[in-house]
Image: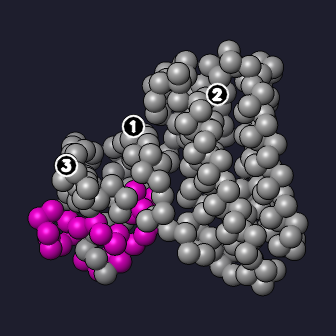
Amino acid sequence: MTVLPALQAELATATDRLLATAASFSDADLAVPSLLPGWTRGHVLAHVAQNAGSHLNLLTWARTGVRTPQYASLEARAAEIEAASARPASQIVAAVEDGAARLAAAVRDLPWEAWSAQVEGMRPPPHPAWYLLVRRLREVGFHHVDLDAGYGPADWPEPFVRRELRDCLASWPHDRSTVSEIILRDPASGGVTRWRDLGGGPAVQGTPRDMLAWLTGRSDGRGVTLVPAGQSFMPGTGGTGLPEPPPWLTMPAPADLPATLPKDY
C-alpha cells in the first residue's frame, strides 16, 4: 500500500468542494476581488483550470520520458489567465471541471513505474511525479480560500495542514527568515512541536492551522502570537506586532523527496 489512493481521495474531495463553491458564482460574483492582490475570483478560477492542464503536461513527461514544460512560459501563463478570467461564469466553471476530470483520468491511467519519473515545474528542484498530487492539492486548497466565499483555513483537512507545514519547514528560506523559532501547539492533543534555528527575528506560536494560514499569507496573523506573549517586534506591522511572514514556497517541492511512492506523506 502506498500514499497514492489517499492522495487521490483527498484531491477528489477538495476538488468537489471547490467546484461547489465555483458553481454558486454569477458573472458579477466572479468580478469581485479575490484575496490575491490584483486578481478577481475569475482570475483565481481561471488559474485553477489552467493549472490542471499544466499538471497534465508534467504527467505526460512522466509517462513518455519526453521533457514537457509545465507552462510554455510565465508570460504565456499570465496572458492565458488574464484572457480566461473575463469569460462568463458558466465557461470558467466548466473549464475548472473539465480540467479536474482530465487530470483525474490521467492520474488513474499513469503506469505504476512512471510515478517515480523525475519532472520539474517552472523552478527547480526536480521531483518525482507522485509529488504532483501534493502540488495540485496545494493549488486547490489555498486557492479555494482565495475565493473569499466562505471557505477558509478552518476548513482545511488535518492531513492537508500537517503536510503543508512539513513541506514549508523542508523548504524553509533560512537566509530570508523573519522568525527564529516557531512553536506549534495542537489544541486537540496538547502536544507542542518546535521549529528552531530558522533565522533572525522573534519566536512565534500558534495552532498548526493558524500558523499555516499566516505563513502562506492567508491570514493577517490571527491566532499567532509572539513569544513571550505581548513582546513587540516591528511595531505597527499589521497591528499585531508580528513581523511579515517569510517568503513562502521558495521551492515548489522539497529537495529530498523519496523517488518511489512512500507509504504515507
Three-letter amino acid code at the position of disc 2: Ala
Q: Position of residue 207 (x, y in %)?
A: 29, 59
Q: Magenta region, mostly helix, strand or loop?
A: loop
Up-down relation of residue 202 to residue 73 (above or below): below
Callout in the foreground (1, 2): 2
Per the image, label 3 sits on a secondary structure element best described as loop
Q: From this viewpoint, which residue is outermost toward the left?
A: 228
Q: Position of residue 162 (x, y in %)?
A: 39, 46
What residue does disc 3 label? 191
Mark 3–mark 1 distance (CA, rounded to whole Å):
21 Å
Residue drawn at x 28%, y 66% as measured from the top left: 224
Mark 3–mark 2 distance (CA, rounded to whole Å):
33 Å
What residue does disc 2 label? 129
Q: How is the image coloured?
A: one colour
Up-down relation of residue 7 to residue 238 (above or below): above
Mark 1–mark 2 distance (CA, rounded to whole Å):
18 Å
**Magenta span of residues:** 212-238
The 10 Å Cα crowd at callout 2, few under 14, some 14 to 19, many 20 or more, is: many
